[in-house]
Image: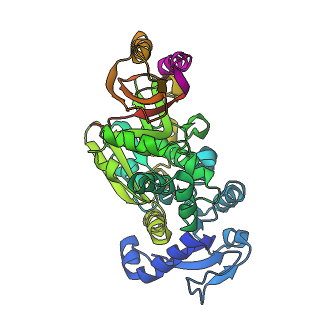
Amino acid sequence: MKAVKIGICGFGTVGSGTFNVLNRNKQEICARAGCDITVEHIGARRDNANSDTTGVKVSRDIFDVVNDPEIDIVVELIGGYEVAKELVMQAIENGKHVVTANKALIAVHGNEIFAAAHKKGVSVLYEAAVAGGIPIIKALREGLAANRIEWLAGIINGTGNFILTEMRDKGRAFEDVLQEAQDLGYAEADPTFDVEGIDAAHKLVILASIAFGIPLQFEKAYTEGISKIAPQDVSYAEELGYRIKHLGIARRNGKGIEIRVHPTLIPEKRLIANVNGVMNAVLVKGDAVGPTLYYGAGAGSEPTASSVIADIVDIARTLSASPEHRVPHLAFHPDTLNNDPVLAIEEIETAYYLRLSAIDKPGVLSQVAQIISEAGISIEALIQKEPVAGQDHVQVILLTSRAQEKKIISALAAIEGLDSVDGKVTRIRVESLDG
Ligand code: HSE
């Protein structure tokens, strides 16, 4: 079989990791692929001191790689939306297969990119775009192909998980930990993508599409960040037997599809509640297999390279197969994608953790309880903290039964309107994540 020639565009952390792992494990990788795989051309603005590229063609213009007639597979590792999209579309137009680690690109422009690739009979693979080194795309598209996926829930942003872990373990403040995550190089170029859940939403939208057979719909994902999580909520959650995690949740309920990223209380006994630091994990519930959990490094040079190279091997193995015999881009063949609606957040149903500051006087708790009960919601647990000396307010923490979000929103407005309640009520969704 003819050698497969790779062009790498972008030679930063992941590009150089991909180059190094391909060289180091070349013999085994080629034995798995059934052909020789060689990096032929690298496009990068500058060299990377972590890789010796002697003997490899290097261009400063990444489009030289895409337009190189020798290249079979273009590996896009530049990140971002616009130039990356132009690069990938040009590669497809030139009849090249593409491997990308770019979650933003796939989540936002994936439908258009896959349609172009389908027309041209080439593959665009993106395992590294979600949860770095964890082969979650492969698991969902292939390993779980027998199942009707019911829901999935993932810790899919390492920076956010690192921040929440440090807040819980060391009682550190949010800003302080974010600075450390940036210094360690985990965070996105714009760290609001990490802490406000945008990075996780990019990844979740991709997972939801391949789990439920729907087109990519980034604009319909609900996104809430972790920047407002207070250390006291982390410790009250702990008292109640929960951990706060920044979860991406996609669920098929009777009315449509939920796609939501938000801080979530989960029972501390769940394995996923114990995924700490920068690690990622995705829990997938299929109707046949039951719950399955995938865990590993969600970022980093060689973990991400591991996924990039798996995609290269997949393409190399199927180069001689006709396009209709390859795994479909979004797991389902394009003409079988469905129109199940993505639900607005007001329509979804979860349990809630509520924390409020109330005047310490008789009758206040019963007023709060009455509003909640009139909304048809029941209180599952309640803690009232002793007043701090010199203060007339006490902290009240409640766990509610499952309720529709819009009912909670109106109940909270009524509670916040009470004279005896001070300021806004803190509200964090709770998920049991049981099988
Ligand atoms: N900023 C991302 C994270 C990198 O923290 O998980 C991997 O996508």
The quadrant of the rendering that contains the C terminus is top left
Residue 306 at x, y = what percent? 44, 68
Residue at the far bottom in the pictured view: 54
Q: Is residue 208 above or below residue 356?
A: below
The quadrant of the rendering that contains the N terminus is bottom left
Q: Is residue 51 above or below residue 129?
A: below
**Res 122 visible:** no
Residue 409 at x, y = what percent? 52, 21
Task: Choose between 406 and 254: the one closer to the eye.
Answer: 406
Residue drawn at point x = 52 percent, y = 42 percent = 205
- What scheme was used to colour the molecule? rainbow
Residue drawn at point x = 60 percent, y = 89 percent = 55
Q: Is residue 111 above or below residue 297?
A: above
Residue drawn at point x = 52 percent, y = 22 percent = 421
Residue 147 at x, y = what percent? 31, 40
Residue 355 at x, y = what percent? 45, 31
How many numbered discs, if any? 0
Residue at the far front in the pictured view: 390
Relative to 141, 188 lies left or right: right
Does the segment drawn in magenta span residue 172? no
Residue range of the region highlighted in magenta in the rendering: 407-423
Task: Choose between 39 and 295: the one closer to the eye.
Answer: 295
**Res 51 visible:** yes
Task: Choose between 408 and 74: the one closer to the eye.
Answer: 408
Task: Choose between 190 and 383: the one closer to the eye.
Answer: 383
Residue at the far top in the pictured view: 374
Q: Is residue 72 above or below residue 84?
A: below
Residue drawn at point x = 32 percent, y = 40 percent = 239
